[in-house]
Every structure is written in structure tokens, then in C-alpha cells.
Image: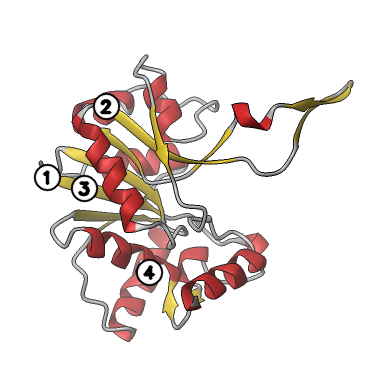
Amino acid sequence: MTKTIIITAGGIGKRMQSHLPKQFIELNGSPILMHTILKFNHYDADIDIVVVLPLAHINGWKTLIKKHNFDIKHQIIDGGKERFDSVKKGLSMAKGDLIGIHDAVRPLVSTKVIAECFEALKTHQAVVPVVSVKESIRWVNSEGSKSLNRNEYKIVQTPQCFTKNVIIEAYKQPFNVTYTDDASVVEKLGVPIHLVNGNEENIKITTPLDLEVAKLMLNA
């Protein structure tokens, strides 16, 4: 079955202390977004790649493509007000029977995890990679806090992968502030979410420390 990966990117990352959008910041000589696209191209050279960018950043991306002689084929579309709107616009360009949605600033996802997510769609309609919580966690409210069993919780990653009919139907629903990711949108339809093991290196680069950690992991 044919596959599409929708890579979603946001705006300026204030926590990165940079005037550049997070996905354009260089990681070992290339913009983070290029590393991310290359990872999916390495997984499957025929995968349909859709990159969703804020309209104001599309020309900047095209400039970077020329600067770095980046020749991996992909479609570009402008995003919407909310991430929900951006994914919906990306879905309008998706050609695959199986669709994955991935954060642009997660360049360290392993091809093994990508493969397992798409492979699981043979028997499931919605698949999400997760890793275990290592630290102790506490639930906090206005009255105080209490310890929780970390074994009952998982950290969610991307790509989150779905059969096309399910993800298209899910995004016909109106936007809701309770949607935290694509799986939560699909879950609203009553579709169960199947979990697979993610890779711990698959961090979301949102701070300068994350960037330094990513550099170390790439060099390793």
C-alpha cells in the first residue's frame, strides 16, 4: 500500500532563543527539517512527503533548499492557525493509503520505529510510538500533589500513523482544545489506538539543550 508522511512545522521557537523557526535551525550543518525529511526518505524512497509550513516561512524554506542543494522530492503547503488546521491542510494533499504525521523537529526517529508504525497498520487503524516514563511523576492540583505510578503512563512520540479513511474522517470533526495530538483526534471517533515501542533518541527539539543533545546523538 502507498504511504504518505505529513511533516508539520511551527513558528519561531522562543525557547530556542533564536530568530529562526525551530525547523530551520542548523543541526550538524543542515536545517533540522532536512534531517527529518531524509530519515523518511531513507526508510522508503517512494514515500509521499508533504511538508506543512507557516505561510511566512515557505520562501525561507525554498531558499534553504537551494543553499543546501537539497533534492529530496516533497510537496509544500501553508499551514493554518492551529496545528489541527495545518494537519487538515496536509491531509488534503496526501496520496497514500497509509498516512503518518510527524513533528518537523523530531529528526532522530529511527527507521525501525517508522517501519513498525506503518507495518502495524496491517492489523490496526491507528498506531502511535511511545516510550516509558523514567522519572517519578506527581499529579498536581490547587490542593497539592500526589505520587502516581509511572508504569501506568507512556510518553507519546511521532510519527503517528493511520489508515487514510480513519484519519480523514477524524479531521472532519470540529476543532477542540482537548486535542493534544492526532491520536486524540482519532480517539474521539471511538477508534482504539495501538501502541508500539518508540526510540528514546526521538526527542522533540524545543530548547537549546535539546539541540545540543541531538548533536551529540548524531555524532555518536
* Residue position for label 1: 2
Left or right: 137 as drawn, with respect to 87: right
Query: Alpha-carbon distance for marks 3 and 2?
Result: 15 Å
- What label sits on residue 125 in the rendered view? 2
Above or below: residue 62 compared with residue 37: below
* Residue position for label 4: 35
Tag 2: amino acid: Gln
Tag 3: amino acid: Thr
Residue at 50% across / 75% down in the picture? 220
Query: Who comes first in sequence, dot 3 or dot 4?
Result: 3
* Residue position for label 3: 4
Query: Alpha-carbon distance for marks 3 and 1?
Result: 7 Å
Query: Who comes first in sequence, dot 4 or dot 1?
Result: 1
Residue at 46% across / 52% down in the picture? 199
In this rendering, the label closer to the viewer, 3 or 2 = 2
Query: Who comes first in sequence, dot 1 or dot 2?
Result: 1
Quadrant where the image shows the N terminus: top left
- What x and y, as percent, mark residue 186? 37, 25
Residue 68 seen in the current view:
yes
Query: Who comes first in sequence, dot 3 or dot 2?
Result: 3
Viewer-nearest residue: 187 or 129:
129
Helix or strand or loop: what does disc 3 sit on?
strand
